[in-house]
Amino acid sequence: MKDAVIVDAVRTPIGKGRATGTLAGVHPVDLHAHAIRALVDRTGIDPALIDDVISGAVGQIGEQKWQHRALGRARRRTAGVRPRGHH
């Protein structure tokens, strides 16, 4: 990747961080994949042109806290975005 281009920004919904919270049954990978798909749909960018996706989480807990890199790869794959040169 030679040039970095910010295409757009999206965020996921937020909910209470407890077992009865509105997003308690949604896995972090699925939540972020939804945001990535929404960005691709909204901008019309060809997913094949995406080399990388940068995302973060505020108040990371559980899997997010220790496995953020693996989650990043899983989010892209779940969203159907596979960086060029990666298999």
Image (cartoon, helix red, strand yellow):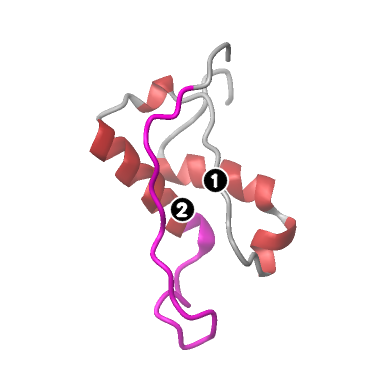
**In what quadrant of the picture does the C terminus appear?**
top right
Instruction: Say which residue label 2 marks.
Output: 32
| Residue 86 locus on image (x, y percent) | 58, 24
Q: Circle 2 — which element?
A: helix
**In what quadrant of the picture does the N terminus appear?**
top right
Compared to 57, does 53 lie above or below? Answer: above
Instruction: Say which residue label 1 marks.
Output: 55
**Quarter location, residue 85:** top right
Nearest the camera: 17 or 87? Answer: 17
Mark with earlier residue (2, 1): 2
| Residue 27 locus on image (x, y percent) | 50, 65
Q: Give the mark toward the camera: 2 or 1.
A: 1
**Quarter location, residue 46:** top left
Using a 10 Å C-alpha cutoff, classify the residue at mark 2 as few (fewer than 14 neighbours), some (14 to 19) or many (20 or more): many
**Kind of residue at disc 1:** Ser
Residue at 40% in and 42% down: 9
Numbered disc total:
2
Q: Main secondary structure of the magenta part?
A: loop
Residue range in magenta is 5-30
Horizontal side of 40 relative to 2 (left or right) equals: left
Horizontal side of 66 relative to 38 (left or right) equals: right
Residue at 45% in and 83% down: 21
Compared to 22, does 37 lie above or below? Answer: above
